[in-house]
């Protein structure tokens, strides 16, 4: 996340407290509350990506539409091999529709590596939830 990314775009809108939303007295309140109220105002979203083959995606690599390689959907912000899962994981921001299971390509070292949008967190927590 950086100065150009709102908490809603980063998938962190749930961190905004109820009283802060009511008071509207925090930096960027106008834009953030507009995005909270109308999801169509969010122009990019944070997504999770998995790749089964090739080198892991790294920062600033392009996320490309698998159906049309001429369309760049966004950019990777971080990525690494996952020893727990046995394949590569990454996060990034995309301007397209981000639906889990959607195939995408990533420009890694002048080659296109096939990947897939996935839900986050990559590994589910093993904590007890009392119902």
Image (cartoon, grey):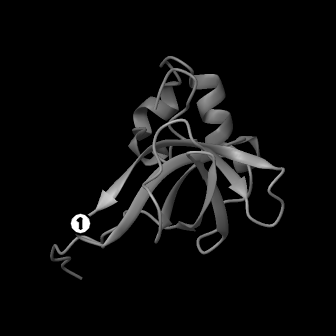
Q: Please tell me whether residue 39 is drawn above or below residue 68 in the rendered image.
A: above
Viewer-closest of 128 and 19: 128
Which residue ends up furthest to the left in the rendered image?
128
- The answer to whether one can see residue 35 in this image is yes
Number of numbered callouts drawn: 1
Q: At which x and y percent is residue 23?
A: 49, 25
Q: Which residue is mark 1?
A: 83
Q: At which x and y percent is residue 44?
A: 67, 43
Q: At which x and y percent is residue 110?
A: 63, 46
Residue at 30% over, 69% down: 123
* Quarter the C terminus occupies: bottom left
How crowded pointer 1 is (Cα within 10 Å; few <14, some 14-19, many 20+) is rated as: few
Q: Please tell me whether residue 47 is drawn above or below residue 121 in the rendered image.
A: above
Viewer-closest of 130 and 125: 125
Residue at 84% over, 50% down: 70
Viewer-closest of 83 and 118: 83
Left/right placement of residue 83 relative to residue 105 reads left
Which residue ends up furthest to the front in the rendered image?
110
Q: Quadrant of the rendered structure where residue 112 is? A: bottom right
Left/right placement of residue 124 relative to residue 53 reads left
Q: At which x and y percent is residue 96?
A: 74, 53
Q: Please tell me whether residue 27 is drawn above or below residue 122 in the rendered image.
A: above
Viewer-closest of 25 and 101: 101
Q: Name the secondary structure under disc 1.
A: loop
Residue at 46% over, 32% down: 1
- The answer to whether one can see residue 45 in this image is no
């Amino acid at each position: 996340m950086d100065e150009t990314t709102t908490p809603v775009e980063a998938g962190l809108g749930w961190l905004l407290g109820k009283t802060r939303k009511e008071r509207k007295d925090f930096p960027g309140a106008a834009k953030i509350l507009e995005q909270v109220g109308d999801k169509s105002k969010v122009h990019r979203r944070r997504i999770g990506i998995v790749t089964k083959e090739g080198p892991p995606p790294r920062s600033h690599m392009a996320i490309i539409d698998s159906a049309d390689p001429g369309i760049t959907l966004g950019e990777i912000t971080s990525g690494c091999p996952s020893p727990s899962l046995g394949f590569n994981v990454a996060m990034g921001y995309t301007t397209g529709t981000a639906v889990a299971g959607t195939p995408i390509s990533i420009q890694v070292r002048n080659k296109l590596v096939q990947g897939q949008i996935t839900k986050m967190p990559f590994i589910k927590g093993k904590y007890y939830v009392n119902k």
